[in-house]
Image (cartoon, rainbow, N blue to C red):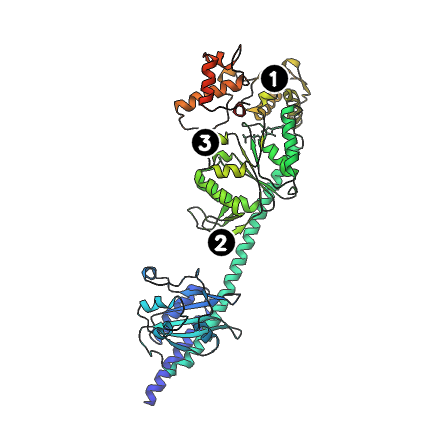
Amino acid sequence: MENALSAKKNRENAVLLSLSNAIATIRDKSDLFDVIDQKLKSLFDFEDFVICIISDDQQTHSPFLYNQREDFQKNAGIAPASTRSYTIDDGLCHAMMATTVPVVFDVAEVLAWDNPPAWLSFWQNLGIKEMIGLPISDRGICVGFFYLYTKEKNVVSNTYYDILHSISLQISVAVSNIRANEKIAAQLQEINLYKQQLEEEKSYLQEQVEKSYRHNEIIGQGAGIQNVFQLVDQVASSDSTVLILGETGTGKELIARAIHNGSPRQSKLMIKLNCAALPPDLVESELFGHEKGSFTGATERRIGKFELAHNGTLFLDEIGELSLALQVKLLRALQEKEIERVGGRSVIKTNVRILAATNRNLAQEVEEGRFRSDLYYRLNVFPITIPPLRDRKEDIPDLAMHFINRFAKKTGKDVRTLTKHVSKTLMAYPWPGNIRELEHLVERSVLLSKGPVLREVYLPKVEHINPDNGAKDNRIKTIYENERDHILTTLKLCRGKISGVGGAAEILGIPATTLNSKIKKFQIKRAHIL
Ligand SMILES: Nc1ncnc2c1ncn2[C@@H]1O[C@H](COP(=O)(O)OP(=O)(O)OP(=O)(O)O)[C@@H](O)[C@H]1O
């Protein structure tokens, strides 16, 4: 008998020793899981176990280490998961916190209490009859619980209590180490994230410095652009969302930057996202960021433009190209003022001023169901429409001189002015690509010019140009859309003149009355034309 007892004692000591050696090498949760599952099981037979940790506010506790068997999810009741938390006020926790020694609970008895733990019936459904609770402590304070579940009753006799107590102390040390490691890893990840943010901010700042050098002069004396400047002055100092409308190349980004630079957010960043430049799923992660592994290719956690623009301005260019699914997500972000990274679980508060731009007729896009009306109304708080260059020809000579000076400086060529003839030619051209097209044409002409006076410019032939360059639409249009677009283009070319010589009806070869009824049918408004 004595021999049998001492053999048992020896076996226990051996398990304890090997457990303690194994615990010393533990680096993470999976190491600890294996040690408990293999070494402790060799001491006595238990079915499963869970280690829970009490939250910092001492109100709840959550599973920290547990078996992640797939069949658990199929069982009735609440399977352990680190995302779940339970109140500490459930009798069981209080009993555990009041003791330093193992406590054995009869599962059926606990379930008959007034306030049984919400998760316990899950284990009963698996046939668990008893559970042994051991406190997990850190420097003498109870920080969690270690529950061992058994299918038989009285598996652990009193003689095991001492050894279980020693084991719980050792496991407590391992849990503390793992939590400390996890904290360091999370901090490292935060540091890397900030590093990435700083790098992105740096590249944005470099871009901004470059642009502010180029953008300190916005050229335009004509009434059309002066009206735009007035609107910019009115809205810049507020936090209002601004919708900037205008054909491609009319200066929408320049105006967005002027609004940002005139706002109290000017010392922060203006981040730009071109909604048309990427496929929809990438636009989502560009906007909101993503967590590591949230999709194939997401090898690193990455913050999105919303986060990057925090306390600054987010300029959403070509907003009309945003998919309907993303429009919903953007609307939610604007309404809630918070975002969720793709694959992320937590919400992130953001304080961002939104400027949006499009060369599409958004009101029409709404009518035709391609743009959500609720998002449109949220964006259309303060619309600014930039007139196309053909409607502000008076600005062309100044703009041309501005670009001549810039490119002469850039290329080192001595070009100082342009002839009257060139000026007239430029003013007669309809500029479907607007100021950007003028900028490129001047650049080319400066390069080709032979003296200090620009005598020649090489304009494309007008008949090849479709001045209604607004929609970059690759889909095949319906006959209805085509007819509407054709009428609209002609009306734009004629600046809204319907009848008489040079009127749209004459060009289209139909009576003015017919054109008028078509305008009605297609719901073409004056604002669409001008
Ligand atoms: N009033 C202006 N004075 C000087 N330069 C201008 C002016 N307006 C536009 N530009 C220049 O014309 C080019 C096109 O402008 P910008 O990129 O702002 O147009 P956009 O309307 O945003 O074009 P897109 O619709 O294609 O995005 C830029 O190089 C910009 O600096």
Residue under label 3, please give it. Answer: 367
Q: Position of residue 335 (x, y in %)?
A: 52, 45
Q: Nearer the viewer, mark 1 or mark 3?
A: 3
Residue at 34% over, 76% down: 44
At x 46% / y 21%, what residue is drawn? 520
Q: Is residue 90 above or below residue 244?
A: below
Rendered position, 123 above or below 410 = below
Identity, as a three-letter code, of the amino acid under mark 1: Met
At mark 3, the secondary structure is helix
Q: Position of residue 475 (x, y in %)?
A: 41, 28
According to the picture, the residue beneath numbered tag 1 turns out to be: 427
Mark 3 belongs to which amino acid? Glu
Q: Position of residue 387 (x, y in %)?
A: 58, 25
Sort mark 1 into few (<14), some (14-19) or many (20+) by Cα contacts within 10 Å.
some
Within 8 Å: ligand 1 and the Cβ of disc 3? no
Instruction: Please state which of the two labelled residues, at mark 2 or mark 1, is closer to the viewer.
Output: 2
Q: Residue at x 61, y 17 (%)?
A: 427
Q: Quadrant of the N terminus?
A: bottom left
Residue farthest to the top?
A: 501
Q: CA distance from mark 2 to mark 1?
A: 55 Å
Q: In front: 253, or 87?
A: 87
Q: Nearer the viewer, residue 453 or 292?
A: 292
Identity of the amino acid at label 2?
A: Ser
Quarter, ligand 1: top right
Would you say 62 lies left or right of 444 here?
A: left
Q: Which residue is mark 2?
A: 346
Return the x and y of residue 30 as percentages of the image width and height: 41, 64
From the viewer's perspective, tell me whether residue 103 is left or right of residue 186. left
Alpha carbon of mark 1 to alpha carbon of mark 3: how far? Answer: 35 Å
- Sequence-wise, the earlier of marks 3 and 2 is 2
